[in-house]
Image: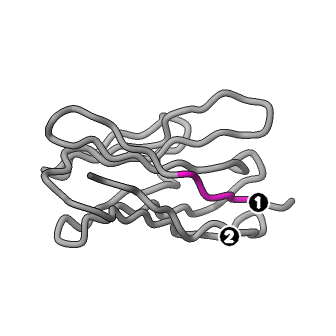
Amino acid sequence: QVQPVESGGGLVQAGGSLRLSCAASGIIVNINAMGWHRQAPGKPRELVATILSGGSTNYADSLKGRFTISRDNAKNTVYLQMNSLKPEDTGVYYCFFTVNSGRDYWGKGTLVTVSS
């Protein structure tokens, strides 16, 4: 049983930085992929970044160079370092974990608001 819980959202000014974290609680078997989606107001959810257990990463093209995903396997935690934030980065950020069975578990989201 895995329950991701996000933290670190808030209000920041354009150009600022923010680090999101997401920790898994419950019984941990094996978490393979971890990652983040986001949903801007009035828009569908989109993939932000993923990271596999071996450390390989994938980012949305528009976010490369500004966002960095990392994970601490010992803590079952995934992070998203967001730099040079823009107003269009505003939205609810959702964490997901994929366990070895292939099932996905989603957090409830954390709100990031970037002011102009």
Part of the protein shown in magenta:
108-113
Residue 114 marker: 1
Q: Which mark is in front, 1 or 2?
A: 1
Q: Nearer the viewer, residue 51 or 31?
A: 31
Residue type of the residue flagged with mark 2: Gly
The structure residue drawn at horizontal position 19% and vertical position 64%, both measured from the top left corner, is 73
Tag on residue 61?
none
Q: Residue at image x 54%, y 61%?
A: 82
Residue 98 to residue 17: above or below? above
Residue 16, disc: 2
Residue 44 is situated, as x and y percent measured from the top left of the image, at: 66, 27
Q: Nearer the viewer, residue 1 or 72?
A: 1
Task: Decide: is 33 above or below 113.
Answer: above
Q: Main secondary structure of the magenta part?
A: strand
Callouts 1 and 2 close, C-beta under 8 Å: yes
Q: Is residue 17 magenta?
A: no
In the picture, measured across the screen, residue 113 lies left or right of residue 110, that is right
- Determine the secondary structure under disc 2: loop
Q: Where's residue 48, x and y in %?
A: 49, 41
Residue 17 drawn at (x, y percent):
61, 70
> Does residue 69 appear to the left or right of 32 in the view shown?
right
Q: What's the distance in space between the residues labelled 1 and 2, CA to CA?
A: 8 Å
Q: Residues within 10 Å of mark 2 (few under 14, many from 20)?
A: some
